[in-house]
Amino acid sequence: MKIGIVGGGALGLVFAAALTPHHDVTLLVRRAAVADELRAGGIAAERDGLVTTIPIRATVDAHDLAACDAVLVAVKAAATHDALAPLAAVLRAGALVVSLQNGIDHVDVARAALPGVRVVAGPTMQGATQLDARSVRFAGAGETIIARDGRGDPGADDVAAAFLAAGLRARAVDDATAILWDKLVRNCAINPLAALVGRTNGAVASDPELIAVARQLAGEAATVALAEGVDVGDPWALVEAAAKATAANRSSMLQDIEAGRTTEIDAISGAVLRRAERRGIPVPATAMIVALIHAKERA
């Protein structure tokens, strides 16, 4: 399968490293210097302590994705429109765009940037830590869920099969809404807490004080999800399982804070806060965590 990947961050590098040995992959990045470095040295992918160099076709030209069957979107949520707009007049008819991003609003933003293009949600639990421009560490083997749209070729099942052929966990579903909310509940509890205290995900499920805060954050997100028509079940069970499964991972928000980048707090906890405010649902812990992360960013 011809696969394009938009975004050269941790997630983009991990999926490019895994898929390239099995498929025809092109990685679209923002900066020419990064593309040059990747073409020259490949992706240095670390898994279980072993580093493998994966040659990669990297580019800054959206036209290089023109023949792709599927395009995976792995940029930060705030960059979605600007990253995808150059592809609007480029992608072939029938190509499937799969958003792997955090949050709950990114698919709508992607569809606005790509009118007439098939765009589906692809929530992923795959963990990754970027070490430098061309180096990445696999952090857990999380599953990627791809929503079916019932039209065009390839379909979600074909993309999931391409993932499976590359040794990645994946499956297709008819509706990913509940899964998006499941992931959002987990992220709302794990990502900002890990970023604030500078610890790996496992601390959220092992430190009693962090557990207490995480429970409140997860509970608030689950309450808003229920008001939106999605019952996530026991929110703490979701968070605890995710934190333990990715115990050694440094959350993407922590990586952003450490690198001095803007985080995705507005796409994650901010999405819950906005919906809560519209519905008149009190979410004091969520409001506080958003404010604290913004203060951390300014620092």
Image: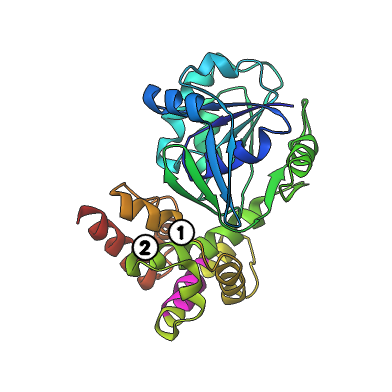
Which residue is located at x 45 percent, y 67 percent?
A: 200
> Which numbered circle lies on residue 101?
none
Quarter of the image for the N terminus: give it. top right
Q: Name above or below for residue 59 compared with residue 192.
A: above
Question: Relative to 118, is 42 on the left or the right?
Answer: left
Q: Is residue 84 visible?
A: no
| Label disc, if present, on residue 251 of the rendered structure | 1
Q: Quadrant of the C terminus?
A: bottom left
Which residue is disc 2 drawn over? 195
Q: Earlier in the sequence, mark 1 or mark 2?
A: 2
Choose between 128 and 240: the one closer to the eye. Answer: 128
The image shows residue 149 at horizontal and vertical percentages of 73, 36
User: Relative to residue 275, is residue 32 depicted above or below?
Assistant: above
Question: Are dots 1 and 2 in contact, CB under 8 Å?
Answer: yes
**Residue 172, placed above or below residue 281:** above
Q: Where does the image place residue 21, in percent across and percent down from the top left?
A: 70, 33
How is this picture coloured?
Answer: rainbow
Q: How many marks are shown on the rendered structure?
A: 2
Q: Secondary structure at mark 1?
A: loop
Q: In what element is the residue under mark 2?
A: helix
Q: Nearer the viewer, residue 109 or 30?
A: 30
- Range of residues picked out in magenta: 213-221
Q: Amino acid at mark 1?
A: Ser
Residue at x 48% of width, y 25% of height: 40
